[in-house]
Image (cartoon, helix red, strand yellow):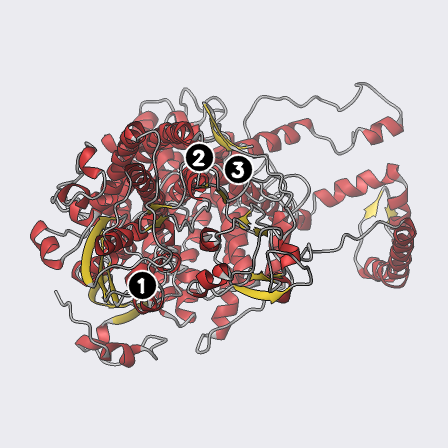
Amino acid sequence: MSTEFSNETLEKDSSNTGLQIVKESEEDRLMTLSVGPQHPGSGHFRFTVKVDGDYIVHCDPDPGYVHRGEEKMCEYRNFIQNIPHLERPVIHDSNNITYSYSLAVEELTNIQVPRRGQFIRAIASELNRQVYTLYWLAIYGIFLGHSTMFMWPTGDRELFIDLLEMLTGARVTHAFNIPGGVRNDMPVGFSEKCLRNISYFEKRLVEYENIFYNNPLMRQRTEGVGLLTKEDAIKLGVTGSVLRASNTPYDIRKAEPYDVYNEIDFKVQYMKSSDCFARAYVPLLDMRESCYIMRQLLDKIPQSGEVRAKLQPNPKGPAGEAYRRVESGRGALGYYIISDGTPKPYRVKISVGSFRNMLALPHLLVGAKLADMPSIYWALNYWPVEADR
Amino acid sequence: MTSAGGFIKAIESGSKHLIIKRFTLRYPEKKLKLIGDGYQFDPKRVVFIAGYRVRHILFHDKCTGCQLCAIACEGIAEAIGMVKVDEKWKHNKKSIMPQIDFGKCVFCGLCVDACPFYALYMTDDYELSAFTKEHLIYTPAQLAVKPKYDGSVELKIDDRGATHG
Amino acid sequence: MASRGSRIVEFRFGNFVASLIWLILIVLIIVSLGALPLIFIVLFYAPLPPINGQVLTPYLFLSMMVDPTRTLPVVKFIMHTELFRVAVFPGFSFAAIFAAVTIFVERKFLAKMQLRVGPLYAGKIEGILQLIADGLKLISKEIIIPSGADKPIFWAAPIAFVAASAAVISLIPVAPGWVVSNTDVGLLAAFAILGFFPLIALLFSWASNSKYPFIGGLRALHQMIAFEIPFILSALSVVILSGSLNLTHIAAAQTPYWYIFFLPISAFVFFISSLAELERIPFDLPEAESEIVAGWLTETSGMIYGLLQLGTYIKLYALAALFVTLFLGGWAGPQIFPQVLGPPGPQSPLIQLLTLRPIYNPIIVNDVFWFSIKTFGIIMLMLLPRGINPRIRIDILLHTGWYKLIVLSFINMFIALALVYGGVFGPGGVLTPH
């Protein structure tokens, strides 16, 4: 299984627009396809595959199309001004990527978040997890050719986006978590609306199972495809639902609980089969579990209290470093922040789940059929913008 | 024949949706009802009120020209610039007020958080398109206008499905 | 406040009247200077038949157009010419109308299943004019031919596609006597024409000189060839029961009971094979959008794409009509149209004219009605898997086509043979119509 990323293949084949079968040698049998950014099956990401008939023999990921220098931009803004641009790498999962940042900054600057603020942060994080997973499921459906499975989750996202708009003030670009808590309190009537939407959504999950997960054609296409054994998964360092689909019950909310997650009782959902079907099914189980967690959070939230710690206009802390991780829709999202005593951080390093999962892409694609390429690629839960930061 | 059973269940699920109501919000004819009045600060309870964060509204009788909103936005989007206005207010000695460029604003609302005099709120007027970039720069006089937004469609869930309106 | 968008144009009655007058003037000029001379020239040189003992001169023809009592015999004469049958009914225009209605209904039907509205804004009622809008758009687009493409084949293949689809239509009987070509080997000819389609797909994809069409063309070839055999075998059971290859005879032979009651498995195999021939979901591998951009249609743009879509939907109508003819009794159905439209008995010529008595044939109208209803039902059934299934993979497709479907069609063929030898069908059988 070749995992080396060699650049010379790109230059050699970038002018190859047609087929040039001149001699029947080993190299000439292969056809290079560029699954590039202008392809309905790839997103803002490019990878070249070399195909021998219908089998892929070499894969070469080429990320970097959406690199914007997030980590460098952090060094020019203070801790609170960083929030709007840091949520942009995964804008539809923004509450998780700023959650981790806020936790790290609070550790650096010794801020204590009030309890009601912690609960609201967890509620927003769970809602965002649903939004992200539904979007992922929609695109997985369309990659397999199932247009209905594209429309239904995209419509059902509206249930949660509506709730988030009520809570945070914006449908997608929330900018809700800041170091010290959340920016505003829950409005009146939020809990009832949230419970009503969650009950309706749990019925919709049954429909998804009927038409997609139990559809024999989908099962034939995903069962047994792209096997990632437990040892390989741990060795490659994949995280999130991909890891949980390979028989490893690891969830950061249980392994290193942050905020109020040690008071919530939930089970880590995992599957044993380690193929594409498991990687597609674990997010559905995660969504069900997330509904269950939300009900507990709405039940246990203290009725009144502060949601935000009092801060100076430019918070700063002593020089030091902090590393915190959060379970986002794609896996472990960690921030490593070094501060030198000024209001602006010295260095921010973001460690995202997508980039780690991308390492499994050449490992899984080599030896697979070309028809399984979109299925394997998207089942790795890879979001190109986040991987490039 | 479990695969036949799977197919029959899928057909049944698909056909059931032919009688469920459609989910679409027919946008220009029907608009969503947005909760509240906009993102504001309640000085009595010293807390922010949740609301939809779009166009700002500037209360001229409270703004002192302290530039804290512009300083807050410098690190984010650089959308606020201070301009001289013709009005003379007692609390605004330099007669400067913010002008906001909505071509650059990301609607994060941190300027509202930064204003210490509760003079800048955000309202739910989101239909801000214009034909030229210069029309997107809102002067302080334009920012003082209270918006009229009348969306009335909500997401309703009943036993025949969820629907808008 | 920032500018709030467009100005509203007010309605001025004077401008409206002026534009109407301009329109009438331009129509008059075009008709008198262009259309009328053209009609005279065509009628002068076209060989017209004698009607009612008189030779049909152009002046007589035009005066007939104005005199309604003499128009209907002319219309009846035209309806029985070859050109009418090929071009209008039951030929190309009939199929094109079906195809157009199918495209629109498919979009609305899928939208309803997916909880959304389909096309909505073209046309006042729920987007009815969407197809015309799409057609206009495709006509006005530039046709881009990739460099290094094989130009003659690139231009000829879409036309050949539409021509082959139209050729299949010409074999299908809509009512007894109303078929474009009534050959004794109708069924065999249909399969022979259907064998052209893999060739056209492969030639077109090779002529596109690009990788994704190449892969798509090979997939189309594999798919269509793999499913031709179950196709033919399932139709063979029908031939065993009816004893003839002539499609009109097959449809007429199903008078007591339709063949679908005796050959349900064959009908199922035929249905699945026709889905694979048409490249519909779940069998749309040759155009798999997320894997190989658009398969063998990648390099098409503008009217070439329009022609290919037209050909695809006409083929859909053709295969659905073939299914109806073979298994559902063609045009059989209870007589629901009255003997005469309007009051019975001898009537004045005006009433006779208005109720279309010279050209109204209740049996034929009834047959056409039932045929259309059944074909439309089968088309809707072919549209249903699109909303329910994902795309199938090539090895599962070939496994299904070569193993499972051939076995199933053989089973039903044995049942058909048993019925013939058991005396139920065949010469002198219990259920054979005379």
**Earlier along the polypeptide chain: callout 1 or callout 2?**
2
Q: Are marks 1 and 3 in contact (CB under 8 Å)?
A: no
What secondary structure is found at the residue carrying circle 3? loop
Which label is found at residue A343?
Answer: 1
Q: Amino acid at mark 1?
A: Pro
Name the quadrant containing residue C7: bottom right
What secondary structure is found at the residue carrying circle 2? loop
User: Would you name the residue on which mark 2 appears?
Assistant: A187
Q: Position of residue C172 (x, y in %)?
A: 53, 42
User: Would you name the residue on which mark 3 appears?
Assistant: B36
Do badges 2 and 3 share one subunit?
Answer: no
Q: Amino acid at mark 3?
A: Gly
A105 vs A48, nearest the viewer: A105
Instruction: Say whether residue A108 is visible.
Output: yes
Q: Are marks 1 and 2 in contact (CB under 8 Å)?
A: no
Report how far apart the C-alphas of labels 2 and 3 lie in the structure. 9 Å
What chain does badge 3 belong to?
A: B
Report how far apart the C-alphas of labels 1 and 3 lie in the structure. 34 Å
At 28% across and 80% down in the image, what residue appears? A11
C202 vs A255, nearest the viewer: A255
What crowding class fits label 1: few (fewer than 14 Cα within 10 Å), some (14-19), or many (20 or more)?
some
C43 vs A232, nearest the viewer: A232
Instruction: Say whether residue C405 is visible.
Output: no
Tag nearer the camera, 1 or 3: 1
What chain does badge 1 belong to?
A: A
